[in-house]
Amino acid sequence: MVTLTIDGRKLKAEEGQTILQVAEDNNIYIPTLCHNEAVKPYGACRLCLVEITRRGREKLVASCLYEVEDGLEVKTGSDRVVSNRRMLMELLLARCPNNKEIQDLARRLGVEETSFQQDDKQCILCALCVRVCQEVVGVSAISLVNRGVDRQMGTPYYEPSDVCIGCGSCAYVCPVGAIDFKDVGDTRYIKWPSSQMDFKLKKCKTCGGYWIPERQLEYMIEQTGLPPGTFDNCPDCR
Amino acid sequence: MKAEVKPDKQKIKSILARYQSDPGMLVPILQDVQAEYNYLPREALVLVGQGLEVPLSQVYSVASFFKAFSLKPRGRHLINVCLGTACHVRGAGRVIDEIKRELGIRSGETTEDLKYTLETVNCVGACALGPIVVIDGNYSGQMTGSKVKPLLESYK
């Protein structure tokens, strides 16, 4: 057990917990975009930055990565934190001025407009989709490619991936809705910022509704070792 | 689009064996593959990924990250034109324009016959000799537009 202070509140936490986890457990709001408890912390968006005092010195750290220690003093809303966070938000807003999630979060953090030259992107390159595809789904169909201003999220060679199962987890976790995902009739369409794919859906034996990509079904059977007929019915008809 | 090279499976295997198929050695492995084919053929990335049990997406991520790797076929001769400040003021612009005109390619491109690849660099540390053109590691100093053609022709 360690004892720390967040915004003047004395809190107890388990060793190994991050500042963000402790804050969330105690209903202290820290904005995040790239954080998701399903995957390891990554520290890409930097919005969760907080100010800590250690041995009398103050510094900014990403709370999603920083593990708590005894006697730690954390401020989640100091002037320095707020102004840095607003700057980050301005930069994100300049990158994705037409993204609703970014606009909403910017407003929430008191940023109405950006003073930087505007682009028109949707993806913030936080790699949450990439990490979920790797750590949770386990297929690693997508990754971040190129570097610098050319950095993008995509499939190898921007072509349909051999290993993608069409589960849509990437679209589901994307914090800014940059990945389009829809089922039309017997086909699922996934549209990433730089490439797209479509998947044939499987029909439910009972109700006849299309409910899951065939490739995802094959992958689930292969991973679990369940008999091939296990998923003949959709969850509603099971 | 130039034709992709079909890499030799055995050759890739022997490169992987050199590094005990250690996924941590991905970058040196790709360097060796590039040394073999002058670029990273698509099929080679697939084979390397399989050999190391690293997903293709991650191999591609690394291969596309480093400027030293090329995913497109490259020429037998690599021409590097220095466009650093010193070379620039000494007329590197005219030199590279002449090379572009002579070869009919822009910087970063490769000639149709796979003979030359043209790239620019921002200083090779020999400013006193500027403008400098480096071909396959050989430095030619005090370049001018009229020296371009004979220099290119000395490479076969």
Image (cartoon, coloured by chain):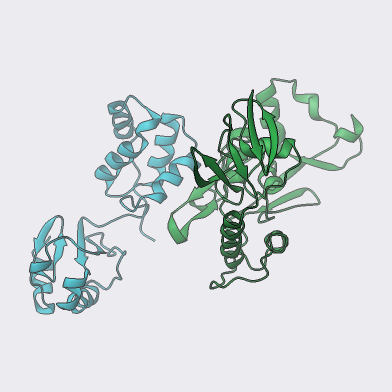
Q: Is residue A8 above or below residue B91?
A: above
| Foreground residue among A233 and A82 | A82
- Return the x and y of residue A73 as percentages of the image width and height: 60, 39
- Return the x and y of residue A197 as percentages of the image width and height: 64, 51
Q: Is residue A36 above or below residue B101?
A: above
Q: Answer left or right for A44 relative to B96.
A: right
Q: Answer left or right for B109 relative to B89.
A: right
Quarter of the image where one finds residue B17 = top left
Q: Is residue A27 above or below residue A97?
A: above
Please identify the quadrant where the N terminus of chain A is shown.
top right
Instruction: Check the rendered structure and report the hue given to chain B.
Output: cyan
Instruction: Check the rendered structure and report the hue given to chain A.
Output: green
Q: Is residue A210 above or below residue A11?
A: below
Residue lying furthest front: A56
Q: Image point 64% across, 48% down: which residue?
A: A76
| Foreground residue among A179 and A11 | A11
| Foreground residue among B82 and B78 | B82
Q: Is residue A215 visible?
A: no
Please identify the quadrant where the C terminus of chain A is shown.
top right
Q: Is residue A177 visible?
A: yes
Quarter of the image where one finds residue A134 = top right
- Return the x and y of residue A211 as percentages of the image width and height: 81, 41
| Foreground residue among A97 and A195 | A97
Q: Image point 21% across, 55% down: which residue?
A: B76
Count of all numbered marks drawn on residues in the image: 0
- Return the x and y of residue B71 as percentages of the image width and height: 37, 52
